[in-house]
């Protein structure tokens, strides 16, 4: 691994773990927030091949082992200076389609691409996520989209 990538990974790990005392910390939830039916799911606008069961599973992973909430906040509201909101109509690194969201989770965001300067490692740093879990998280994130 090159020194540059090692430094980027170390910086991402430090930020994701709350290593910058000046940053607002997103406290891990005791449990996932009360179930809400996300806006896209309410309107029956899930893309072909995405089920409500995938959304529900992804919601649980997002708030636990996927550690997505650490940077993107509870229910995708975002954490200033870390991760953008996922529950609005503005998509910074893709077109907001389900496939683009799944791809973004898999490949992450480099410092050069990031609007906050904070990188998102592939799979958000939760490297043990399976492909099915990534697709489930993508389904949940897609369901959060604002209109």
Image: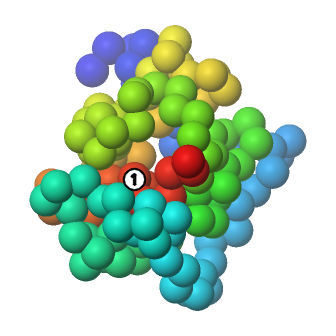
Residue 109 in the figure: left or right of residue 100: right
Residue 34 at what x, y percent from top left?
A: 58, 87
The residue beneath circle 1 is 142
Q: In the rendered picture of this protein, how many numbered marks are placed on residues?
A: 1
Q: Nearer the viewer, residue 36 or 60?
A: 36
* In the depicted structure, whether residue 67 falls above or below residue 56: above
Residue lying at the far front of the rendered structure:
43
Q: Is residue 134 visible?
A: no
Q: For the residue carrying disc 1, how many other residues have a C-alpha within 10 Å: few (<14), some (14-19), or many (20+)?
A: many
> Which percent across, then down, holds residue 4?
43, 13
From the viewer's perspective, tell me whether residue 68 is left or right of residue 126.
right
- Element type at mark 1: helix
Of residues 74 and 55, the one drawn nearer to the viewer in this rendering: 55
Please tell me whether residue 69 is drawn above or below residue 81 in the rendered image: below
| One can see residue 43 in this view | yes
In the picture, measured across the screen, residue 87 lies left or right of residue 104, that is right
Between 45 and 112, the one nearer to me in the picture: 45
Q: Which image quarter: residue 25?
A: bottom right
On the image, the x and y values in percent for residue 66 come to 39, 62
Viewport quadrant of the N terminus: top left
Which residue shows up at 32% across the image and 14% down it? 2
Q: Residue at x 59, y 82 (%)?
A: 33
Whether residue 123 is situated above or below residue 77 in the rendered picture: above
Q: Residue 58: image x %, image y %?
A: 34, 68
At x 22% / y 70%, what residue is drawn?
51
Quarter location, residue 44 = bottom left
Which colour scheme appears in the figure? Answer: rainbow
Residue at position x 52%, y 85% in the image: 35
């Amino acid at each position: 691994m090159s020194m540059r990538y090692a430094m980027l990974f170390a910086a991402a790990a430090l930020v994701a773990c709350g290593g910058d005392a000046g940053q607002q910390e997103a406290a891990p939830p005791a449990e996932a927030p009360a179930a809400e039916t996300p806006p896209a799911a309410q309107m029956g606008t899930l893309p072909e091949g995405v089920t409500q069961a995938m959304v529900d599973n992804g919601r649980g992973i997002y708030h636990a082992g996927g550690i997505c909430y650490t940077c993107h906040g509870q229910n995708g509201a975002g954490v200033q200076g870390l991760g953008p909101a996922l529950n609005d109509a503005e998509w910074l690194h893709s077109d907001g389609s389900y496939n683009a969201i799944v791809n973004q989770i898999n490949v992450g965001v480099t410092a050069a691409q990031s609007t906050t300067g904070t990188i998102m490692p592939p799979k958000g740093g939760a490297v043990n996520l399976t492909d099915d879990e990534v697709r489930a998280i993508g389904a949940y994130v897609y369901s959060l989209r604002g209109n």
